[in-house]
Amino acid sequence: MTDIAFVRSEIEKAQPAPRSQTGLVAWMRKNLFASVSDTILSVIAILFLLWIVPALYGFLIGRAVPPGGTVEQCRVENVGACWAYIASEIEFFIYGFYPMAEYWRPNIVFAMLALIGLPLLWPSAPFKVVNAILFFVVFPIASVVLLSGGMFGLRYVPTEQWGGLLVTLIISVVGISLSLPMGILLALGRQSKLPIIKTLCICFIELIRAVPLITILFMASIMLPLFMPQGTTVDKLVRALVGVTLFASAYMAEVVRGGMQAIGRGQYEAAAALGLGYWRRMGFIILPQALKHVIPGIVGNFISLLKDTSLVYIVGMKDLLEAVKTKNDAIEWASPTQSVTGYIFAAAVFWVLCFSISRYSRYWERRLNTGHKR
Amino acid sequence: MIKSLLSVALAAGLGLSASAAFAQTTTSATLDAVKAKGYVQCGVTGGVPGFSAPDANNNWSGLEVDYCRALAAAIFNNADSVRYTPLTSQERFTALSAGEIDVLSRTTTWTMSRDTQLGIKFIGTMFYDGQGFMVRKADNIASALDLSGAAVCIESGTTTELNAADYFAANNLEFNTVVFVDQDEVVKAYEDGRCDVYTTDSSALAAERSKFANPADHIILPEIISKEPLGPVVRQGDDGWFNIARWTYYALLESEELGVSSANVDEMLASDNPAIKRLLGVEGDFGTPIGLTKDWAYQIIKLVGNYGEVYEKHVGPSTPIGLARGLNALWKDGGIQYSPPIR
């Protein structure tokens, strides 16, 4: 036995990775310049950013006229975005022609939407049943009374004076809240064994899906008045609401049907074997699984519905985009970048709304992700 | 909303009896209906500056809006008894014939086919519009006849394009068109100097000019090469309402011609001029026979003003739109705005 000269009593500390594998240079080498094609793409992308970012910065911030500026500041050569115009006309973009003295009424509706609607979207918030009753019964009635007035001493505000973001939100919220349940019923009807119900549902879905939304709204606005007796009219907002909701629910029905077809036959049979009736079978066994499958499809429909609301300009309603377009011609803010600034603002608002819906749906997909993730 | 749905269902059920009730023989069914609901429903554009557009306080304002206000002033002695329905150009005539609006005051060009085939009646020309030319002041062009060899920015597929081609051919001028699909592109191209001339309706030229960084660097040439008479429209078949609508327009013109304005109308009540006396209802009664009051024109002038005032306020040279009176001046000032006498 020779003496063991050295016995390590503790594990040597690991050496740091070689310099060539860490740090900025290595990250760039790995992620940006790994191969020739990567390098070419990276260079193109970097050149593109170098070109677009300063230009965007200059237009949106650098040369822009901040809120509070005057029209004279906007009316110069090579000016950036005229944010002063947006700030000055923001009320029209939000409320349309709603009388200024009555702005508190839409404001209360917006606040109710936030206070009642948001907890409903948040799974761990308490009092779900009360909350749902508040949102689906109390909130719509209170909103209609508040917005249109004519009772309880509130001044009557006809719907043609509603506009801007207010109208966009009303149509989206009503469309989204009604089209999902209607779509589910239509999907169930289409799968039904009762011939009349089945035929009706198929006809409705196929008819609506075969016609563009713009045509439905156009019909509602131009043909409908001709069928009506002289002097009677349907409120334009109601026309838009009905058109948008019917349209969205037909699409929703097909999405839901797609989800139901993904459910194995065994699930239907097992549910029937338990002795459950039709509604329980669907409500407890089939639909919860089916809807979970098609969340991306449903949310896609919601987002396209939100964006489709801007088509209501066809019936003469001034939604957010149309309000912006109207004010883009406003003479008191006439300046070279007036329209561009208006469109950027409208795009930003739509992006915030649609992106929030999209993120929220991702949250539900993760939450319901129980063994189906691929 | 539920209420209106209900009323729709009810109305659909009672459709026949309702239309029968409307056919009663009074001076004007429309006037009766307007008086009963308490406001004039006026169809306007979605927003054309100077004609009908929301102002800084988000109230409708403009030349055509003031016509509706004048109508309301004549009927209700209150120029604010108007509700506005913004209409697209496709739905405007349907809205009128379906009774959704009482009068259409929406940059509508008076043409024979519209007047004779759509069941509508034009009551007059509120604004004589027409195609014009805009050039850069620095180019020192004073007349469209100097435009030979110029590059002209035009929107494609419009009557604008055809009108310009006709005009240049008729005057033996050479020109190069630079054609674009969209109005905004045309303006941008003109601004960027890709052409020397921008042509479209003169009111639109003026509105676009006000958006330039230096509007004063551009001038609109005096030549107008097409006829675009814009005027209010009512439904055919209600002559009483047509009379009220037409004479409201004439009252605006007549008061300017007689020098009666919103500022001096109260003093003018004591005027010795018989024409003014008749206009203001001091002598004779021209309002009652058409279903209005004796002082109908007084109310119009007091609450809205005369044609000249309205023009100056919304589209005249002192506004950002800056349109000279031109054809829209009174006949005695070299224009063609003319009112038959009130007597």
Image (spheres, coloured by chain):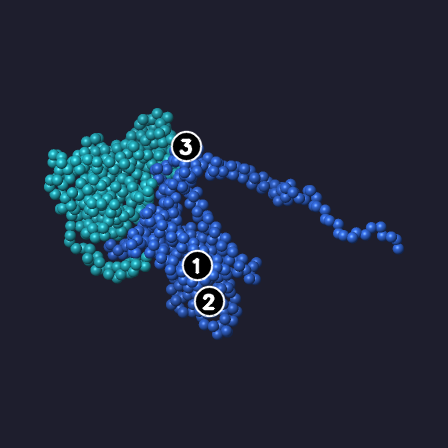
Label 1 in the same subunit as label 3? yes
Q: Earlier in the sequence, mark 3 or mark 2?
A: 3
Label 1 is found on which chain of the structure? Answer: A
Amino acid under disc 1: Met
The residue that appears at 45% across and 62% down in the rendered structure is A127
Label 3 is found on which chain of the structure? Answer: A
What is the letter of the blue chain? Answer: A
Disc 1: which residue = A252
Label 3 in the same subunit as label 2? yes
- Density class for disc 2 (Cα within 10 Å; few <14, some 14-19, many ≥20) is few
- Dot 3 falls on a residue whose secondary structure is loop
Q: Is residue B187 visible?
A: no
Amino acid under disc 2: Gly
- Dot 2 falls on a residue whose secondary structure is helix
Quadrant where the N terminus of chain B is found in the figure: bottom left
Q: Which residue is nearer to you in this view: A1 or A181?
A: A1
Q: Which residue is nearer to you in this view: B21 or A150?
A: A150
* CA distance for labels 1 and 3: 49 Å
- Dot 1 falls on a residue whose secondary structure is helix
Q: Which residue is nearer to you in this view: B97 or A296?
A: A296
Is B79 on the left or on the right of B284, as rendered?
Answer: right
The answer to whether B235 is drawn above or below residue B317 in the figure is: below
Picture coordinates of residue B336, whole percent (x, y): 21, 34
